[in-house]
Image: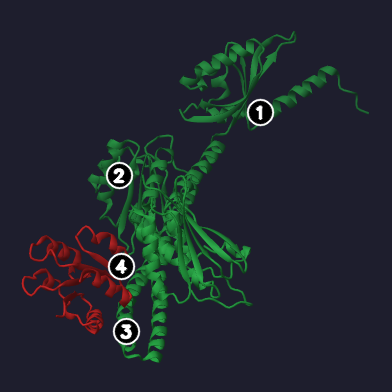
Chain colours: A red, B green
Amino acid sequence: MDKQILVVDDDPDILDALQFVLESENYYVKTTPKGEDAENLRTNLPALILLDVLLSGKDGRVICQKLKNRKETKHIPIIMISAHPSAKQSIKKVGADDFLAKPFHVETLLKTIRKYL
Amino acid sequence: MKARKSLKEQTEDALFYFAAIVESSEDAIISKKLDGTIASWNKAAEEMYGYTAAEAIGQSIKMIIPQELQPEEDEILNKLKHGIRIEHFETTRLRKDGKKLIVSLSISPVKDQEGNIIGAAKIARNITEQKKTEEREQFLEQASLILGKSIDYATTLKNIAKVIIPYLADYCRIVLLDDHKAIKEIAIHHKDISKRPLVAELYKAYKDRSKTTHGLGKLLQKGKTEIIPEITPQILESIKDSPDILNLIKQLELVSYMGVPIKIGTKVVGAITFSSTQKDRIYTNADVVFAEKLARRAAYAVENARLYAQSQQSLRLRDEFISVASHELRTPITSLKMYTQGLKKQLEKRGEETMVFYLGKMDNQIDKLTVLISDLLNVSRVQFGKLEFHEESFVLEDIVQDTVDNIRPTVKKHRIIIKGDGRKKVKGDQYRIGQVLTNLITNAIKYSPDSDKIIITLLPQQDGMLVTVEDFGIGIEKRHRSKLFDRFYRVSETSEKTFPGLGIGLYISQEIIKRHGGKITVNSEKGKGSQFSFFLPYSH
């Protein structure tokens, strides 16, 4: 069975590219530019979430913290991504499992995902 | 043939000449008896002190000595009696009209024919103006120092107001015009703080009076210096239609006034007004000249501050632009990189070797672009001191390993060997140290195209860890070494293959290490290789 990955990023180009890469690796990919879609996850939970740090209008770290504080979602591994490499320091506090700085190597991305799936 | 003059005649002649010299001297020449009674008083003394010879002779010398300096005179008389020499000195004397003078005095004893001291001759030179000029020069120097101290001209002009009071005025006002010609109040000052509200009220009362003959409105409008040496009853009479102003001026006891514009070229940018409440401070042309000098210096300060703010603003805009641009560039590069690598992986599976080879080249080019963009962003941040630092303690070995892991996929033939013991925790910003390591390692690879290894050594020392990145490449000539860390510096040798780059990697790295309290050092031998080292303190 293909594992489902939810990708949250406000840039549609990044979503497209990530979808292409992850689908090539046989993951089942759902993408959304809206932070709310991740924040309100209740059913059909993904196996892993790739979450941008700075979403338009929403802070990805706040979403991460909420998901990690909820019983139903706290087991889902969250990898945060950002074009600001220095964001790495702020994501541990919100319970994120890992961090990738954009632009990243596809191999690094896949390796990181495999660590959790 | 004329008969030779008798000795008596000669003596009389000499006395006549002496008297003429004394009378025509510009210095006051006075003689006094040992009890302090004035015995002679020349013309210059009359002018200087305001007493005629008839008024002065027979009186005590103490009449021209201010009360607080009377003991000084007693001491002088005492010294004279004992034949002690009195060195030339400066002191204050009092005129008949109550004004004070600064004089330079020489006192010598007068002896009778037997050699007994019977009195003293005093030569006094009025150095009040000279002193004032000296003081003004000092004042201007002090003002210039204050003005040059900061580019925050509002604060510096406020400080100027503080030195104007009480030296040059009893109350003063400094205003500047903003870009829309609106008056910006910079300082209102009175030597008596309790009267400051009165001054403010006075200026407020003047605000709507465009008809006034003097004052700020006129100053700013005409850009010409103005002076009212004495506020006469007639002047007060002429403003009786404005009882509020009249009342305030009376309460403030205004005696004399002058105002100077602050001009840059011909443009009026502000003004300073000086008001005196002291009877013996009547503004003169010399004061006006001086006030204008001060205003000119204030103008320089304002102009410098404006130019500085302007240049800072354009630098800030450029910085913001670079910051936004490099962030915007990162996004398409991220997706470009993912497509390229995703494609490469797919083609690998299908065994399309040629395509995979060229996609690999594409990927390398994208990496170069990525480095250039982040350098661009960093250099503007470093320059503005905006590089953020998050100090924490971390295991150096981990960050070295992470960095090497990140670089490895892009390295073709070089082996990166980590040596030594880096388990002890150090203090610093993990991410920035990673940046430095990345820079040093990629440089090492770039400048050793014919070698196949890079050695990173972690050497524990007493207070911290020494990190060395060593390559076996082309090396760096001595003359380039000191400039290596300058911004935009690149080693260029016509005889050599050139290496691409913006020349800012080492500059940024050096700045980062400096922020950690250290320094990057370099050891190198041309043709043998280079070693770059930096030190990080342990966290305790």
Give the residue number, with chain letter if any, for mark 3. B345
Foreground label between 3 and 1: 3
Q: Amino acid at mark 1?
A: Glu
Residue at image position (17%, 70%) is A57
Q: Nearer the viewer, residue B24 or B166?
A: B166
Mark 4 to mark 1: distance in Å? 90 Å
Residue A23 lies, in percent from the top left, at: 21, 83
Q: Earlier in the sequence, mark 3 or mark 2?
A: 2
Of mark 3 and mark 1, the one earlier in the sequence is 1
Q: CA distance from mark 1 to mark 2?
A: 45 Å
Which of A72/B421 is in front? B421
For the C terminus of chain A, the image quarter is: bottom left
Residue B237 is labelled as 2
Query: Circle 1 is placed at which residue position?
Result: B23
Query: The residue under label 3 is which amino acid type?
Result: Lys
Q: Secondary structure at mark 3?
A: helix
Q: Is residue A11 left or right of residue B21?
A: left
Tell me the mark number nearer the camera, choosing from 4 and 3.
3
Q: Chain of mark 3?
A: B
The chain containing the residue under callout 1 comes to B
- In the picture shown, does residue B328 fall above or below B46? below
Q: Chain of mark 2?
A: B
Q: Using the image, determine if residue B490 lies above or below residue B515.
A: below
**Residue B8 x, y percent position in the rendering:** 82, 17
Which sits in the foreground, B113 or B375?
A: B375
- How many residues crowd around disc 2 within 10 Å: few (fewer than 14), some, or many (20 or more)? few
**How far apart are the alpha carbons under marks 3 and 2?**
98 Å
Residue labelled with disc 4? A84
| Tags 1 and 2 on a common chain | yes
What amino acid type is highlighted by mark number 4? Answer: His
